[in-house]
Amino acid sequence: TTDATAAPKVVSRTLTVEIRNGSGKTGLAGVIKTKLVTFPQLSVSKTGNAAKDSYEATVIVNKENFSLPDIGAVIKATTQTTLPEGEAETKADILIILGKDAQ
């Protein structure tokens, strides 16, 4: 478990991002990947589908509490440090699970 009040971890390398589509909207992970190229500190390493396609809200899983760029203009999401139940582990630094609210 991590301390939610801890300061974000700042790193000087590019963070890897995995995007999983949990919205049920075909092709959405690719659309969001294209939008994230505007952030040089992020590199999308993988896209695919989430364990289920019924996520209502988009979730960013930031297990190591990395300091993230302000991606709010591209994606509205809640951030948490734990994987949702049923989701497979990721090798990426950041996991974005797209919900029905993603566009």
Image (cartoon, rainbow, N blue to C red):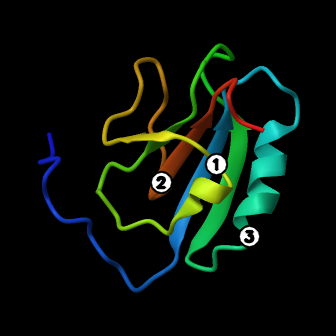
The C terminus is located in which quarter? top right
Residue 79: where, in percent of width, then height?
Answer: 40, 43
Q: Alpha carbon of mark 3 to alpha carbon of mark 1: how far?
A: 13 Å
Quick check: marks 2 and 3 in contact, CB under 8 Å? no
Q: Which residue is mark 3?
A: 37
Quick check: marks 1 and 2 in contact, CB under 8 Å? no
Disc 2 vs disc 3: which is toward the camera?
3
Q: Which residue is mark 1?
A: 75
User: Element type at marker 2?
Assistant: strand
**Residue 85 - label:** none
Label 1: how many Cα within 10 Å (few below 14, some 14–19, many 20+): some
Residue 25: where, in percent of width, then height?
Answer: 83, 25
Up-down relation of residue 26 to residue 56 (above or below) = below
User: Element type at marker 3?
Assistant: loop
Which residue sits at x=58%, y=60%? 71
Which residue sits at x=26%, y=65%? 8
Q: Quadrant of residue 99?
A: top right
Amino acid of disc 1: Ile
Mark 2 vs mark 3: which is more N-terminal? 3
Mark 1 vs mark 2: which is more N-terminal? 1
Q: Which residue is mark 2?
A: 94
